[in-house]
Image (tube, rainbow, N blue to C red):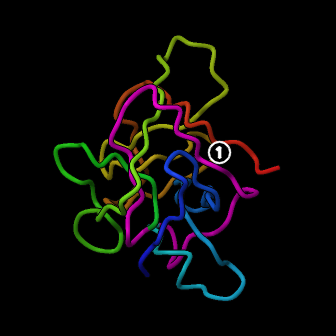
Amino acid sequence: MAATVESNGKLVRNCYRCTKCRELFYCTDFDYDKAKTACCPGTNTHVQGTAELMVNDTGSGEKGWKFCKYCAALYYASSATAGTCVGGGSHVAVEVEFTLTKVSSGSDSSNSWAKCGKCACLYQRGGGTANCAKGASHEAASTDSYTVNVVPKS
């Protein structure tokens, strides 16, 4: 599977949270082509766990977030390594880059998205197991959360 992320430069539709790995991933077609759901560390393919979401880049915060060409997850591409992809080796970036706002742990934030310190993917904290490509569960790189401006599609 090779993800081709359609974007206007600041907004990406067709994003979901996987029920197995809890990662934010990109998918254009659940109904007709299972290969387009990409590989998941929890199962063979990501499993849609939310209604369709949108990622909106406000331009303020931590730069370097990209979608992986193979696992379709949003990951921090500016890390020392490109993170670990369940598709094998390191993540391979698609062209679109995002800036995500980091919220300190002391902030009152309903946002529960974190960067995994093992695979570099963005995942949602809480709510059960969050399988990681490097084995076991995701481990937050810090206590900070990310405001990803992911909102239900209207």
The residue under label 1 is: 127
Task: Give the residue type at disc 1.
Answer: Gly
116 vs 80, nearest the viewer: 80
Image point (72%, 56%), residue name: 50
Looking at the image, is 142 positioned above or below residue 135? above
Question: Is 121 on the left-hand or right-hand side of 15?
Answer: left
Residue 123 colored magenta? Answer: no
Q: Residue at x 34, y 74 (%)?
A: 87
Question: Which secondary structure dominates the residues rendered in magenta?
Answer: loop
The residue under the point 32% across, 61% down is 93
Query: Dot 1 lies on which element?
Result: loop
Q: Is residue 66 magenta?
A: yes
List the single residue furthest toward the bottom: 32
Percent coordinates x, y for residue 141 in the rendering: 34, 35
Mark 1 Cα-neighbour bin, 10 Å: few <14, some 14–19, many ≥20: few
**Which residue lies most toward the front here?**
8
The magenta segment is 42-71
x and y percentages locating residue 37 in the rendered image: 56, 75
As drawn, 107 above or below 116: above
